[in-house]
Structures are given as structure tokens and as C-alpha cells.
Amino acid sequence: MTIQFKRAIRDQVGLLIGLAGGTGSGKTFSAFRLAAGICADKPFAVIDTEAGRAKHYADAFRFDHADLSPPFTPDAYAEAILAADAARYGVIIVDSMSHEWASEGGCLEMQEAELERMAGDDYRKREACRMSAWIRPKMAHKKMVQRLLQVRAHLILCFRAEEKIEMVHDDKGKLQVVPKVTPTGLNGWVPVCEKNLPYELTASFLLTADHPGIPQPIKLQDQHRPMFPAGAPIDEASGKLVAAWAAGGKAAAGPVTPQTPAGQAPQPSALPLADIEHHVDAMNDCESLDALKGAFEASKRAAGKDRSALDRFTAVKDTNKRRIEAAVETI
């Protein structure tokens, strides 16, 4: 075999982006906005592990959908992702990647099944075999990861996140309950996945329900920071910057919403999450531009000077405006 070297240039570099968050954090919607910006007028692929929930966005975004059903084995994920890459989609969204680890047929269940096969109900033997029962699940997971790293498309992986705590001694020796500190999580929120998978990501972010759609970087290298301005929601503009950088251009930041001052955490929304979702649902249900305008004005009145809520409502309004205009053009 002859190996040849040539001058390296950045051209069609695929990014592996992770979005982690709990319920109501906006990770799915953010993933769709990011993918839409990267793909422009071309459809992207969505691998849906949540019984078709991604189809809720079918009127707002242009994408091709595939259900991934149990068992959620690493091989099943790899097969679905490689099929999407072979079809030459520019972006592949996986929602949710957490099922590969902690759901029916995932790695945790695979380890338990392997332990049952090796030791049955023999307690002493189960304890002796507990570590060796991880060999097959971990090998399957590592094989899947190696396949993901060969994908040429941009991969956006959505993870569920859970709040974790730990007991630590303070300076007086007293035990205190504090958010768990981990290099793959943030502020006590930890992605539900195999512990080493986050290290393979190009960039990863935490999204929270008190500030939906606003990314808090877990892993973000300097060359990628202009694509995700601090305090601004993940949106189509971010996707355009990703596409330009991957094609060899510079990731010069474009117009964004007002940013959070350096060193200051994003301010949580003053509106209750239920109220925010009520206004979002109202705009999603609109079938005319006049109705959308009315719903948006109502959401602005409710938000007042709450910048977080206003940003969310504006993004939803813009998405639905495109949906309604596209529907009118096809009549």
C-alpha cells in the first residue's frame, strides 16, 4: 500500500454536534433550525427514536424522516446513520441518541442480558461476571462510534440530560449536596449516554427549560465559537456559519440577538414554562399570516421586557411565517 500526503485544506469537513437537555429545553427545535441553516433549500435527514415526534415539525422544516424502533442497539443506530449518509444528506439529526445507552435494547439492557446469560440467578457468579458482561455491549458501542467518525455528513445528536448531584465536604468538613461536576456535563446536568461518547463530539451544548434554545457550551473550540455567539439562540444563522466554515470559508459571525455580557450567565425567563409553551402552540396552530400576527402580538405582550421569551417567540413566529408562506405558494 502506498500512502500519499498532500497539503491539508479545510473542505467539506463534517461536524459532530451534541445538544443535550431536559424536557422543554428546545433541543429538538434547535437541532432542526441548525440543520435547516446548513442545508439551505435541501432536505436533511431525521432519525426519530420517539415514535414519530419529529413529524410535529413537518410543516415548518424540509426534512426526510425515518423511524428507529426498539431494540435500540448500537448496530441499529449505525445502520440508520450510514444509510442516511449513503443517501448523501448534508445533515443527519438523531433524536434521541440517549436510547442507544439507556432504553429498550440499549447498552445497559445488553449488559444485563449478557450477565443473565453468563450467570443466571447465581448471585456470587453474577458479581464475578459483572465486568466481563460489559465486553460485548462496549465493543458494539465502540464499533458504532468508529462508524460515526467516518460519516461525511454533519451529525447533530440530541441527548436527554439528567440533573445529578454529589456529596462533598465544605471547608468546615460538613457534607454538602452540590451539582455533580463532570467534564461531559454542565451545572449538574449530564447527558444520558456512554461516558466517553461526548469526547468524540466536535462541539456540545447544554440547553435548559428556563432558557429554551440558548446554548451553554460544554465543549466548544475557538475556531467554532463564531458559529454559536454567546447568549444567542441556535438558529438558521448558526447553520449558515457552520456550512460556510465546513466548506473552507471563515466563520465570521453574522447578525445575532443581543448577547449576554461576558462572564454573566444567561438570565432565565420570567415567564413560566407553561405560559411560554402556550404561546408557542398558539403560533404553531396558525393557518394564516393575520392569525400568526395576532398570536405573536399576544406573546409579545405576555413577554414584556423578558428578552429570553421574546427571542423564543420571535424564532417561532419566523418559522411559522415561512411555513404559511410556503403553503400559500403551493395553492
Image (cartoon, helix red, strand yellow):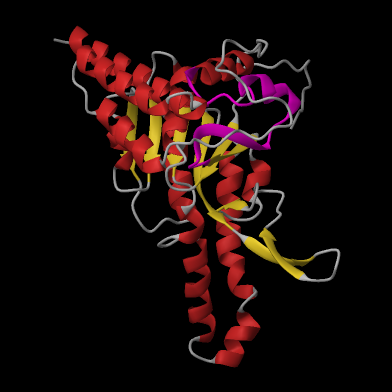
Q: In this rendering, is residue 38 above or below 15? A: above
Q: Position of residue 52 (x, y in %)?
A: 29, 43
User: Split into 4 quadrants, where in the image is the N terminus?
Assistant: top right
Which residues are the magenta region?
Answer: 208-236
Which of the 4 quarters of the picture holds residue 291? top left
Image: 281 above or below 250: below
Asked if one can make out residue 88 in the rendered structure from this viewpoint, the answer is: no
Whether residue 103 appears in magenta in the rendering, the answer is no
Residues 102 and 118: in front is: 102
Looking at the image, is 213 positioned above or below residue 251? below
At 57% from the left and 65% from the top, the residue drawn is 136
**Horizontal and vertical percent position of residue 331:** 13, 10
Q: Judge whether residue 128 can be spotted in this image.
A: yes
Q: Position of residue 63 (x, y in %)?
A: 34, 26
Quarter of the view holding residue 317: top left
Residue located farthest toward the left when viewing the structure as drawn = 331
What residue is at 49 percent from the left and 52 percent from the top? 98
